């Protein structure tokens, strides 16, 4: 399904995310000079509704066959950690749907669109992962007779806004020496592929078109790694949509195009890029059968010079249950006297921590575990404190009661026509695209919602759902409010209400 795009009003500074390191360029330059480049493989993979449509085990095999080190995943439907476990990878950013064989440090705020991956001891790259809206789909609009200008306006209104967060956040990192990557299912072709030259070999293309989403990414300074490795779109098309659903089933009149990308910027060099898909498929460089998704994937190989990071701290999971171990990873350069403390959310680190430990870990992937059984459910922070007692980095987590289940409610069971719905939820998964949808009472088709809002990755919160989200005021009648999981149609909780004249 298509992603419902989230806007953002706040972008963190590079210095804030990297622990202030980039305010000290001499230190960063010296660090870059002492470490050789690393070779890494970055993969983008829309796994098709959680990878369950054919075989989740085959999704795992596809990643193994590709030899990927970092995967930006779309349509994971909450299965990121299960797939990572099957790969033997302990590192997952579920909010951004990124898996890695290397340690991940997730920024505190979900509005930061990227996560940091420590590909060398103390040195990081950044990766953002997107899934742009699926419908209306531009190539089908071209097929069905829409004009150049009509399709351009459609793209500018639907998909272009959904990539803006990454466009704003990644170039400053790259400019300061961080290798950056943008993976994603763009649900839109590349501006590099719909050219006058390609018209001669692809009769389905009725006119050249500079697809806005990909053009905006390129204008921001990112490079399309597949086209760096395969420069001529007339001879190597690299189609990722579609392998069939499932392969080899393809409906009559289907369109085919390259809509899945691995972009890069900063100190990175593209060595290779391959389509991963069904054996014998067009331009498939890494093949296996059966192929588990309706999309083919892309894996690109890079030489990168990662940047030395400042103090970083993160929890392995953002939401835990009472009694679960709290695994904390940290990076505290040149300081073996620091501490990791757990405090109530927002509390100062020196104000009676509820838990504390000295790092005491000289490995290149330092981490520690805390017990949580004595903590009351609620919001907490893990804080990295340096040897002088000063806070160096902070990350939040939420502890649920062992028996807690997702809940959703309204402040009123009956609403007057024209009144906004005041939705409240508790014990949500806290994933990036958890959403609250309005349905007519008894609606059995989960795609037939009336309107929706996102929870903004909160475990507990509230939001007004007004006519802007619904398209118009609700007609009198009976409805349901449903808490939905991470951009999929799994209902976690529901509450009934009525609209009266």
Image (tube, rainbow, N blue to C red):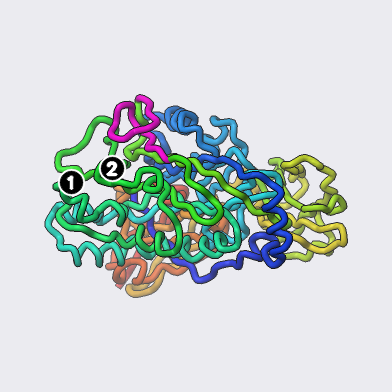
Left or right of 182? Residue 175 is: right
What residue is rendered at 37% in x and 28% in y? 287
User: 12 above or below 133?
Assistant: below
User: 319 above or below 12?
Assistant: above
Q: Position of residue 312 (x, y in %)?
A: 70, 54
What residue is rendered at 73% in x and 52% in y? 376
User: 329 above or below 246?
Assistant: below
What residue is rendered at 21% in x and 45% in y? 255
Residue indicated by mark 2: 237
Whether pointer 1 and pointer 2 mark residues with C-beta atoms closer than 8 Å, the reply is yes
Q: CA distance from mark 1 to mark 2?
A: 10 Å
Q: Position of residue 346 (x, y in %)?
A: 71, 65
What residue is rendered at 56% in x and 63% in y? 175
Q: Does the magenta-highlighted stretch encompass residue 126?
A: no
Q: Which residues are magenta?
A: 273-289
Left or right of 231? Residue 101 is: right
Estimate how packed mark 1 is, as few (under 14), some (14 to 19) or many (20 or more) residues with alpha carbons within 10 Å: few
Q: Position of residue 298 (x, y in %)?
A: 40, 41
User: 56 above or below 230?
Assistant: above
Q: Nearer the viewer, residue 442 or 129?
A: 129
The quarter in which the C terminus is drawn is: bottom left
Per the rendering, the mark at residue 79 is none
Residue indicated by mark 1: 202
């Amino acid at each position: 399904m298509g992603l419902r795009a989230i806007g953002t009003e706040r972008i963190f500074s590079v210095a804030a995310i990297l622990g202030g390191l980039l305010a000290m360029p001499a230190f960063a330059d010296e660090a870059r000079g002492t470490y050789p480049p690393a070779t890494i493989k970055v993969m983008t993979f829309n796994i098709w509704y959680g990878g369950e449509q054919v075989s989740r085990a085959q999704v795992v095999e596809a990643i193994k066959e590709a030899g990927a080190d970092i995967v930006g995943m779309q349509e994971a439907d909450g299965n990121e950690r299960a797939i990572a476990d099957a790969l033997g990878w302990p590192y997952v950013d579920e909010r951004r749907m990124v898996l890695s064989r290397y340690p991940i440090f997730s920024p505190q705020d979900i509005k930061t669109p990227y996560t940091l991956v420590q590909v060398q001891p103390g040195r990081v790259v950044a990766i953002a992962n997107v899934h742009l809206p699926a419908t209306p789909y531009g190539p089908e609009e071209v097929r069905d007779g829409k004009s150049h200008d009509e399709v351009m306006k459609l793209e500018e209104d639907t998909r272009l806004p959904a990539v803006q967060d990454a466009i704003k956040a990644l170039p400053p990192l790259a400019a300061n020496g961080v290798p950056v990557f943008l993976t994603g299912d763009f649900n839109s072709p590349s501006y590099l592929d719909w050219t006058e030259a390609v018209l001669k070999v692809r009769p389905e293309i009725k006119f050249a078109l500079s697809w806005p989403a990909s053009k905006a990414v390129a204008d921001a300074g990112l490079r399309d790694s597949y086209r760096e490795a395969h420069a001529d779109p007339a001879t190597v098309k690299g189609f990722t949509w579609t392998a069939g659903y499932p392969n080899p089933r393809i409906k009559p009149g289907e369109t085919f195009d390259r809509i899945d990308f691995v972009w890069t910027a900063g100190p990175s060099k593209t060595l290779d890029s391959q389509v991963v898909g069904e054996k014998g498929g067009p331009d498939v460089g890494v093949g296996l059968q059966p192929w588990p998704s309706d999309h083919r994937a892309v894996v690109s190989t890079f030489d990168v010079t990662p940047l030395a990071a400042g103090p970083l701290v993160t929890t392995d999971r953002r939401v835990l249950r009472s009694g679960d171990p709290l695994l904390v990873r940290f990076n505290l350069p040149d300081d073996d006297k620091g501490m990791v403390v757990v405090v109530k959310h927002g509390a100062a680190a020196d104000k009676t921590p509820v838990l504390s430990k000295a790092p005491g870990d000289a490995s290149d992937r330092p981490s520690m575990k805390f017990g949580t059984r004595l903590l009351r459910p609620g919001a907490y922070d893990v804080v990295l404190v340096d040897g002088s007692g000063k806070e160096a980095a902070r990350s939040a987590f939420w502890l649920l009661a062992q028996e807690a289940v997702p809940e959703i409610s309204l402040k009123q069971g009956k609403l007057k026509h024209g009144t906004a719905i005041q939705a409240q939820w508790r014990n949500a998964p806290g994933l990036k695209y958890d959403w609250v949808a309005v349905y007519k009472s008894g609606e059995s088709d989960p795609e037939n919602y009336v309107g929706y809002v996102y929870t903004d990755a909160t475990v507990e919160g509230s939001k007004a759902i007004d006519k802007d989200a619904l398209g118009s005021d609700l007609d009198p009648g009976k409805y349901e409010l449903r808490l939905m999981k991470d951009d999929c149609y799994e209902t976690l909780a529901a509450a009934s209400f009525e609209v009266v004249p």
